[in-house]
Image: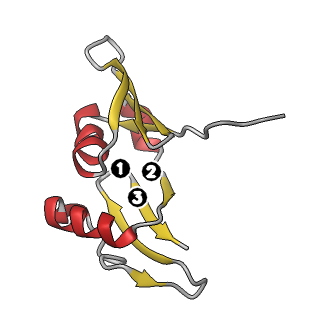
Amino acid sequence: MTYEILAPNVYYTDINDGLKFFVDCLGFSIGHNEIKSKEPFCVLEKDGLQIYLFEHASLAGEHNPEFRIVTKNIDDVYAKVSKSHPEYLHPNLSKVTLRPWTAREFALRDHQVCVILQEW
């Protein structure tokens, strides 16, 4: 048995909020685009990762995902994101911080999603 990608579903009341967070801030690109359809949806991609982004108000109200993106260049990611989109820095982990489990981390959030960026 072989797995290739774990691709979470993320729901927003307005899909444009998710595009601003993942595309504009984190540098994902749109790989599959049904944003203008009756049920807006797209697949975001970056470096072999995928996120399925949906516009669905009732599910957005039920789901507030938190997940990690592991990187080997956290200082570069932090420098770029903190300069271009400081409004997304999570108040509880707004700087690259060495955690007790020896990973370096910082976190981002919008009104729907929390993303922890991590480097081991």
Tell me the residue at 22%/43% (across/down): 20
Residue 114 - label: 3
Taking 91 as reference, is 49 above or below it?
A: above
- Structural crowding at the residue carrying mark 1, measured as other residues with C-alpha within 10 Å and reported as few (<14), some (14–19) or many (≥20): some
Residue 33, image x, y percentages: 34, 19
- Work out whether residue 85 or residue 40 is closer to the camera in this orientation and state it: 85
Q: Nearer the viewer, mark 3 or mark 1?
A: 3
Residue 39, image x, y percentages: 36, 16
Q: Nearer the viewer, mark 2 or mark 3?
A: 3
Q: CA separation, marks 2 and 3?
A: 8 Å
Q: Residue furthest top?
A: 38
Name the image quarter holding the C terminus.
bottom right
In the rendered image, which residue does mark 1 sit on? 112
- Work out whether residue 88 or residue 62 is closer to the camera in this orientation and state it: 88
Amino acid carrying label 3: it is Cys
Q: Marks 3 and 2: in contact by CB < 8 Å?
A: yes
In the rendered image, which residue does mark 2 sit on? 64
